[in-house]
Image (cartoon, helix red, strand yellow):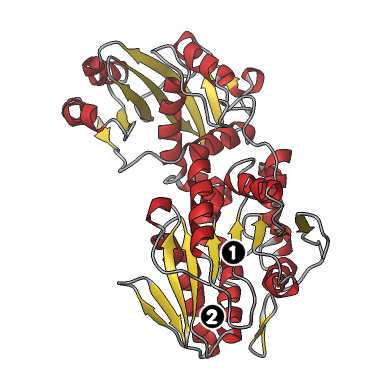
Amino acid sequence: METKSSLIIPGKTQQIIQVKQNNIIRPFIHQRQIMSAPFAFPEVSYFELCGGYGCGKSFSIVFMISVLAKRYQGFDVQIALSSTTITLLNKTVILDLQKLFKKSGSRFEYNQKDNILTIGTVRFLLIASGQPTDIYGPNVHITLCDEVDELPEQKAIEAHKALSERTRLTLPDGRKPFIMYFSTVHGYRGLYKIVQELKSSNLQNVLVRGLTKNNTILDPQYVKNLYAIYDEQERLAYLEGRFVNLQSGRVYGNYDEATCKCAPFEITPEYVVMIGQDLNSGFSKAVAVVKKDKKLYIVRGWSFKEIGGGPSIMRSTYMQNQIQWYPDSAGKEILKGYKKEIIDNGIQCRIGSSNPRILDRVFYINKLFKMGLLYVFDCKETNDLSEALKVRSYNDLGQPEKGKGESAPDHYCDSLEYVVYRIVRSDPDFMHLKDLSREAVAEHGYIKIAGQNA
């Protein structure tokens, strides 16, 4: 092994087909690399599989569980199995493990009350990395951590520290304790900071890259579509597992007035007007969107000095149209009194339990503009919104800028994101974008997307 502080094993482009032949499952190249790494480099304590979407990261954990359970069978070994939430672990890793064990005729015990999975003498303790301060209790020999980069940067760093403190028991064969991360890369965020910290501390780590295209179960057209919809930086991060700067410059880089503005058309009664609204004490912005010929059009924006007057203004603007309202779900106190006024004006409420992640909202806006599926009316009613789309930038922490006061661009932009996100997630005409999104892959994993071909 190299004596450098970081040994990088790049993902290769050769195709390894993962199919069941005579009850043998053949892992992809990056899965084989990450599974063998802890035993090929017994002096290393940190391993990372930086994978593209759909490369099979979660199933790599399933493989690792099987390998470790067999290797240390007969010994009292405890392994932490971590993800952002226990629920996500159940939907991905545990579900895939159940399927694999059922096919192979193997057995395990799963105590959901105590979140402990047992395979013979080896116990796996399920831990939520999304609550770093709650990571305490028994010490473990090994930690397998899924999707650490889905956490906010500071939480990811805190989780790494907490997991490192708990992973302290030497294994029965003398191998030192180790931690393995399996994650999509979200730019220069949590996992990048963790790897950089290891380097600065002169702690060796093995980094494996898993390319999306190396999962040969995926439909080639699906992979081609992913490469088409992402820009160069996004391809490097989300499809090839590389650390690149994803959050710099303009938030809505795919918005170009020259190509994304269009001449207004009449909003006749057959159109459904869908309105997103940002709620703030003392002022509020709203954005109206309609769908025509399988495309979305931003037809106007509002700035309400008196929030209470908003519903009547919306209704008087579109007197004969069906109106659907998608508000800022974080403004719970304002929503309490506001909801009745909305309903009294014949407007349908579409209130979510919480706001979707900013990362996903921005993704949908940018890709709709890029694909020619979202346009802005070229009129005075959308001038302020258009300006907001042009000028909103990322702050020093790599987050979309949150300005101060009524004139800040984020209010119009958030309003647009609320309504567009909900349209994409519910309208069949936009399901192709939903299925290609980072969010869909993170939720369902590559097996779901591959059509259950594994």
- Does residue 20 sit above or below 182 in this rendering? below
State the mark number for residue 258. Answer: none
User: Is residue 4 toward the left or the right of residue 80 in the image?
Assistant: right
Instruction: Using the image as rendered, state which of residue 422 and residue 443 is in the foreground.
Output: 443
Kind of residue sitting beneath label 1? Ile
**Residue that sits furthest to the top in the current view:** 380
Residue linked to disc 2: 100
Residue linked to disc 1: 179
Give the quarter of the figure containing the N terminus: bottom right
Instruction: Using the image as rendered, state which of residue 253 and residue 40 is in the foreground.
Output: 40
Of circles 2 and 1, the one toward us is 1
Kind of residue sitting beneath label 2? Leu
Tell me what residue is drawn at x 66 percent, y 57 percent. 51
Q: Position of residue 268 (x, y in %)?
A: 38, 23
User: Is residue 23 toward the left or the right of residue 137 in the image?
Assistant: right
Tell me what residue is drawn at x 57 percent, y 69 percent. 61
Instruction: Using the image as rendered, state which of residue 289 and residue 367 is in the foreground.
Output: 367
- Does residue 76 sit above or below 425 in this rendering? below
Instruction: Using the image as rendered, state which of residue 291 and residue 403 is in the foreground.
Output: 403
Q: Is residue 449 visible?
A: no
Q: Position of residue 431 (x, y in %)?
A: 51, 49
Q: Secondary structure at mark 2?
A: helix
Check if mark 2's residue and mark 1's residue have beta carbons within 8 Å: no
